[in-house]
Image (cartoon, rainbow, N blue to C red):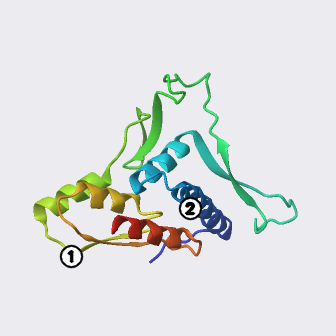
Amino acid sequence: MLAEQSERWQLFYEKAWAERAEYMRSLLNTGKYNTMQIISMLEKKQRFFQLVIKNNDENNADNQNADVRWLPIRFDAKKEHRMFTGVPMIKHVGLLGNLVYVPFYAQCRIDQLLIDLIDTTGPYDAVVELGCGYGRNLFNIFYGGDQQIYAISEENIQSRVKKYAVILRQQLHQ
């Protein structure tokens, strides 16, 4: 069974991925960056900016004409101790149904778990990631593992992010 999402959030998700894909495409089109640099630049952008939906038509409740745009994340300077990079020292994340505080730059690296799993228990024919966005975990597995493995990704949206994922995969196989 698939999780259900309201139409409002489906539309936001669709538009947000189209905006991310356009950002990545603009970097790719410069010819200056490789795949991992483009992924890292998107991650860096998302540390300081968030995608928000702005409805330009207050009478249009379904957001069909709404724009998605990048806005700076406003950290609360009164509540948060800042690092020299400008981000809070800690963030809260969900763990086992509870909010826990971790260093801002701490990451849960499922891709590293999968690399180790593939390398120690493989070989496998393929890795399939459903709901992969632009496929960051698959790129990390491709670049970080010992085995060449076929990666299959699927994102359940209609936007051009699928098309962009194909472009990135073609760059990987050159």
Q: Which of 97 and 74 is in front in this view?
A: 74
The mark total stands at 2
State the residue at coordinates (51%, 58%).
Answer: 28
Query: Which residue, as the protein is rendered here, is positioned at the far right?
Result: 59
Where is residue 27? Give x, y as percent: 54, 54
Q: Quadrant of residue 30?
A: bottom right
Depth check, front residue: 127 or 147? 147
**Marks 2,1: beta carbons within 8 A:** no
Q: Of callouts 2 and 1, which one flags the residue occurring earlier in the amino acid sequence?
A: 2
Task: Estimate the spatial distance between the alpha carbons at disc 2 and disc 1, rounded to whole Å.
Answer: 28 Å
Mark 1 lies on a secondary structure that is loop
Give residue 17's position: percent from left, percent from top. Answer: 58, 62
Side (left or right) of 142 relative to 102: left
Q: Please name the residue that numbered disc 1 is placed on.
A: 125
Label 1 neighbour load within 10 Å: few <14, some 14-19, many 20+ = few
In the rendered image, the vertical position of residue 169 relative to residue 96, given as above or below: below
- For the residue marked with disc 1, what is the amino acid? Asp
Residue 21 is marked as 2
Three-letter amino acid code at the position of disc 2: Ala
Q: Tell me what residue is drawn at x 35 percent, y 60 percent.
A: 139
Q: If the image is split into quadrants, where does the C terminus sit?
A: bottom left
Residue drawn 59% across the image and 72% down it: 159
Q: Where is residue 115 in the image (x, y as percent from the top left)?
A: 22, 57
| Residue depicted at x 35% and y 65% | 172
Expressed as whole percent of the image width and height from the top left, the position of residue 37 reads 43, 49
Task: Tell me where residue 106 sits by quadrant.
Answer: top left
State the quadrant of the N terminus. bottom left
The vertical placement of 84 against 100, above or below, is above
Q: Which of marks 2 and 1 is in front?
A: 2
- Classify residue 129 as left or right of residue 123: right
